[in-house]
């Protein structure tokens, strides 16, 4: 929910699909998708009581819902046995309630979200990956029977972003901080992001909708890792056949995201790439790419 992905509307839908195929790999974070919807009606969502609200005239607040699915695999996913020393198979599916609050005077953006869902076979990660691989003629994944077992996902996330510099809407620089607490991910991060080109104005009012925009972005992030259930297994269900021990989890990771965004008054398109340092001692650097398509109404 960073500012360079802002859509200037109180009503929009956006589809996101990530896959490591876009980065010519097939391991670690292997694929994910989300369906995101923002509507004024969602202001009545009872989960919004979990979010901190800024009640000043300069703050515009939007509410939304999203369905998110994440899938992870080891490198040799086509082998039926456990890949000791590599990451386990894991998948999760969640319903996310979220809030975006933009202060147009202070040029700040505060986001909150709450995820409720499942990880494990209930998230149908195996069915999705096997189906895609069969349809595209790739090797069939055979190790999903060793995946992280079913467990509940309860995750809370907050983010804060402050614009530091804007040069004639051709270049901008923002500082970001983010924290997640829950049964799927517990971590904290700091970062920067820049946009360059004919850029959007994410800290302006949503009523100030402008025309065609095209810009690149770059976002370095450093994260401190507390818990990662896709590696360590569920918090409540300890019966997963294979997990990464806590002592082998890398507690500091670096990630670099970059991409291109094209926008009109009603349409949004993005192509992205990401690279992250190894997340456990015997792991490796991971890469993936993604596309996002959205529209206002």
Image: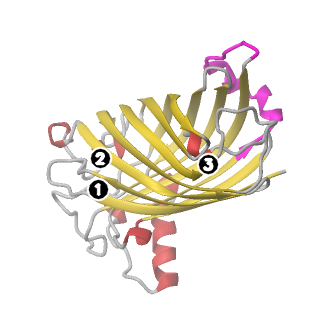
Residue 251: percent from the left, percent from the top? 22, 36
Q: So how many labels did they put on this image?
A: 3
As for residue 53 lying within the magenta part, the answer is yes
Q: What is the crowding at mark 3: few (fewer than 14 residues within 10 Å), some, or many (at least 20)?
A: many
Residue that lies at the very extreme toward the bottom in this rendered image: 137
Q: Nearer the viewer, residue 261 or 225?
A: 261
Q: What is the crowding at mark 2: few (fewer than 14 residues within 10 Å), some, or many (at least 20)?
A: many
Relative horizontal placement of residue 42, taking residue 139 as reference (left or right): right
Q: Tell me, yes or no, whether the two marked residues, 2 and 1, touch with CB atoms within 8 Å.
A: yes
Q: Earlier in the sequence, mark 2 or mark 1?
A: 1
Residue 79: percent from the left, percent from the top? 26, 74
Distance from disc 3 to disc 1, alpha carbons, whole Å, reads 40 Å
Residue at (64% x, 43% y) in the render: 6
Marking on residue 62: none
- Quadrant in which the N terminus appears: top right
Residue 69: percent from the left, percent from the top? 53, 53
Distance from disc 2 to disc 1, alpha carbons, whole Å, reads 6 Å
Secondary structure beneath label 2: helix
Relative horizontal placement of residue 62, taking residue 19 as reference (left or right): right
Residue range (magenta): 37-57
The quadrant holding residue 193 is top left
Q: Earlier in the sequence, mark 3 or mark 2?
A: 3
The quadrant holding residue 16 is bottom right
Secondary structure beneath label 3: loop
The answer, for residue 91, to whether it is visible in the render is: yes
Secondary structure beneath label 1: loop
User: Which residue lies under the disc numbered 1?
Assistant: 88
User: Which residue lies under the disc numbered 3?
Assistant: 199
Relative horizontal placement of residue 43, taking residue 2 as reference (left or right): right
Distance from disc 3 to disc 2, alpha carbons, whole Å, reads 38 Å
User: Which residue lies under the disc numbered 2?
Assistant: 231
Residue that lies at the very extreme toward the top in this rendered image: 56
């Amino acid at each position: 929910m960073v500012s360079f992905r802002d859509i200037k509307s109180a009503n929009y839908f956006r589809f996101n699909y990530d896959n490591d195929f876009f980065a010519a790999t097939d391991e670690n974070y292997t694929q994910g998708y989300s369906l995101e919807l923002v509507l004024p009606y969602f202001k009545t969502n009872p989960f919004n009581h979990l979010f901190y609200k800024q009640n000043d005239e300069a703050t515009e607040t939007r509410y939304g819902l999203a369905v998110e699915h994440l899938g992870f695999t080891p490198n040799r996913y086509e082998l039926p046995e456990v890949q000791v020393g590599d990451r386990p198979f894991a998948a999760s599916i969640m319903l996310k309630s979220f809030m975006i609050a933009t202060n147009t005077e202070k040029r700040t953006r505060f986001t909150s979200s709450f995820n409720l869902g499942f990880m494990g076979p209930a998230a149908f990660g195996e069915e999705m990956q096997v189906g895609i691989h069969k349809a595209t003629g790739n090797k069939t994944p055979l190790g999903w029977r060793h995946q992280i077992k079913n467990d509940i996902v309860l995750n809370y996330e907050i983010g804060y972003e402050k614009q530091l510099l804007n040069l004639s809407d051709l270049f901008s620089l923002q500082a970001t901080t983010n924290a997640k607490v829950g049964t799927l991910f517990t971590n904290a991060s700091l970062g920067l992001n820049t946009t360059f080109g004919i850029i959007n104005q994410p800290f302006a009012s949503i009523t100030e909708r402008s025309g065609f925009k095209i810009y690149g972005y770059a976002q370095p992030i450093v994260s401190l890792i507390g818990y990662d259930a896709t590696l360590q297994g569920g918090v409540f269900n300890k019966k997963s056949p294979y997990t990464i021990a806590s002592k082998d989890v890398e507690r500091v990771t670096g990630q670099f995201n970059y991409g291109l965004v094209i926008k009109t008054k009603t349409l949004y398109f993005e192509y992205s790439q990401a690279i992250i340092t190894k997340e456990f001692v015997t792991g490796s650097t991971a890469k993936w790419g993604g596309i996002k398509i959205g529209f206002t109404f």
